[in-house]
Image: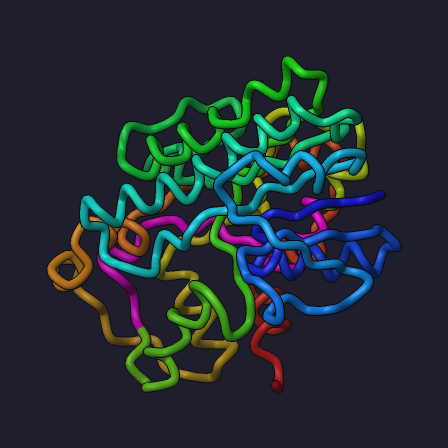
Amino acid sequence: MRIVIIGGSGMIGSAVSKLAVERGHQVVILTRQTPPAIKNTQNPQYQHWDGKHAESLDELIDGCHVVINLAGQNIGDKRWTERRKQELLQSRLEPSTAIVAAIKKCNKRPAALMQASAVGIYGTGDEVKTESSSPGTDYLSKLAIQWEEATREVEGLGVRRVVIRSGVVLQKRRGVLARLELPFKLFIGGPIGSGRQVYSWIHINDEAAAILFLVEKSTCRGVYNLTAPNPETNSQFGRILGKVMQKPFWLPVPGFALRMVLGEMSTLVLDGQRVLPKRLLEEGYVFEYSGLQSALVDLLKAR
């Protein structure tokens, strides 16, 4: 297949691209970088796109089999001011609306669109959430709803659309895991807030493999949760992390302190969702890492 990845240089996109090439697919990564920053490789190929306008995008995706839309700024990078919230929204809506416009202009439209989203759409709480669960009403829920809706129109154009609701993606040296490791390295690891909030996590290998599973299985369409089948509370996550790192788990981090430092963004660590990959399992996907300890052992093994 010829697969075009928008947001292909990020953590998830890089893993998907690498695995797709290994499986024999032709990958094109669209990047905002301009020559000579663009890498000169045959597979994956790198092409410039500004991430906003449909002009030229139609030529880049015309005739490809699948478009994977992973574009969107990291929600955990900066404090959520009103300006930052608008940046996060626009970084998702602009590429998504441009993709729809470009697909309309294609002579040969892509067969499928993989649309990124997140489990934050379900709101927070301990109740089990599956793909049929209703969305929440907080900021992250509203952000994800708008993100998903931005490409819904392609379904009426004959394009198979798959919505990928990702959980907390665990990757060595990057993202959430790198931040969670730090206090343990300093021997001050412990529960965060109540410790009862649930983290619906997924190993980066399963994230990439599950996306390609949905790409390659042409009968898959609609919403899929990309989370491991065994979510963990923050306390249990920390205990397992401390065990794998051979570091103590003892010093609680008060929730009020994080709220003072992070503001509304503290919900990323103080709240959680118990999300299960019901539809993905029903389709026959087999997780490489269904348990947290085996996932962390792999990610934190000698580097």
Q: Residue at x 66, y 58 (%)?
A: 289
Image x and y of residue 15, in percent: 66, 60
Q: Residue at x 38, y 70 (%)?
A: 179
Residue 67: in magenta span: no
Quarter of the picture containing the C terminus is bottom right
Image x and y of residue 225, in percent: 56, 37
Q: Is residue 138 left or right of residue 163?
A: left
Residue 193: in magenta span: yes
Per the rendered image, the range of residues in magenta is 190-211
Q: Residue at x 19, y 44 (%)?
A: 82
Image x and y of residue 61, in percent: 71, 38
Image x and y of residue 218, in percent: 80, 29
The answer to whether residue 275 of the structure is visible from this angle is no
The answer to whether residue 101 of the structure is visible from this angle is yes
> Which one is in front, 242 or 148?
148
Give the quarter of the image for residue 11: bottom right
Give the quarter of the image for residue 140: top left
